[in-house]
Image: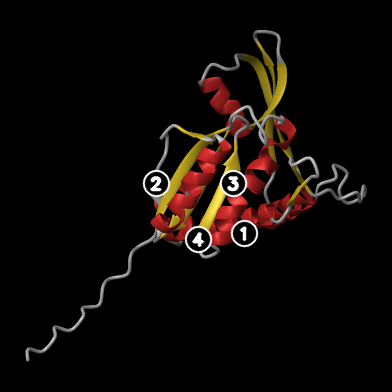
Amino acid sequence: MMNAEPVKNQAPVEPRCYSHVLHFPNKRPFDNADLRWPGFIGEFVTPIVTSHPEVLYWFSFYGAFARFRVHTADYEALRPQLEALRDKLGLEDRGEEKDYVLENDLGSARFRGPNCKVSAKARGESVLRALKGASDLMVESVIQRPDGYWEFELNEDVLQNPVSGHRFSVCHLFHNLMDSKARVFAFHDARGFDGVLSHIYFHNARQKGQIAPVSAQHHDILM
């Protein structure tokens, strides 16, 4: 009898990043603009991350669409649920993003300086873990109303939360931790529009020709 060949140890599969840009339909639970974001978190994000607690993930909101990103070595395990929820909710994925390289995104020059003491990959992983923690908080902060829509839990402590949201208190602590300031631009547009935008949105809107400022002044706001 021939000896069976020993099983070779397989190299561990490296996790990869996957990104989905999901456009909202004009139907429940997304037809109310004020409740669209908590609806996305409650109906789409929560079931996926509850079923796959080992996955590193984060998500972000852009009004008409959202980004949902995961970092995993077993994407195929969650893909069927992700696609089923996408189709059930009418979220449109136009294929704008599928996967990306962590160090080229969260570890890029936007997130680290030229004298950074860690690699781009290590910085990307640190930023990802911070975003995952914030995402976990957002998942546990949405509640479903009797009418089926979702909303963020309220906090009526007017001294601590004058805008009735505990997440603003967390944001305040995050700015204190980072010793950071929020920079905004107050501008007057050539078409007669006056507005205030964060520095990122101000520069992006100017480059895209969405605004034509004839005057602008930046302000650093302590959070």
Q: How far is mark 3 from mark 2, CA to CA? A: 21 Å
Q: Nearer the viewer, residue 60 or 6?
A: 6
Which residue bears the numbered disc 4? 55
Tag in front: 4 or 2: 4
Q: Amino acid at mark 1?
A: Gly
- Residue 117 location in percent, x, y? 46, 61
Note whether 50 is above or below 144 in the view shown: below
Q: Residue at point 74% right, 42% down?
A: 148
C-alpha separation, residue under disc 4 versus residue under disc 1: 12 Å
Q: Residues within 10 Å of mark 4 (few under 14, many from 20)?
A: some
**Mark with earlier residue (1, 2):** 2
Mark found first going from the N terminus, 1 or 3 = 3
Q: Which residue is mark 3?
A: 44
Callouts 1 and 3 close, C-beta under 8 Å: no
Per the image, label 3 sits on a secondary structure element best described as: helix
Comparing labels 4 and 1, the label whose residue is closer to the camera: 4
- Label 2: state its secondary structure: strand
Residue nearest the observer in this picture, 88 or 194: 88
| Few, some or many residues within 10 Å of mark 3 (<14, 14–19, 20+) | many
Gap between marks 4 and 2 measured at Cα:
16 Å
Q: Residue 51, percent across and down?
A: 55, 60
What is the number of the mark on residue 133?
A: 1
The residue type indicated by label 2 comes to Tyr
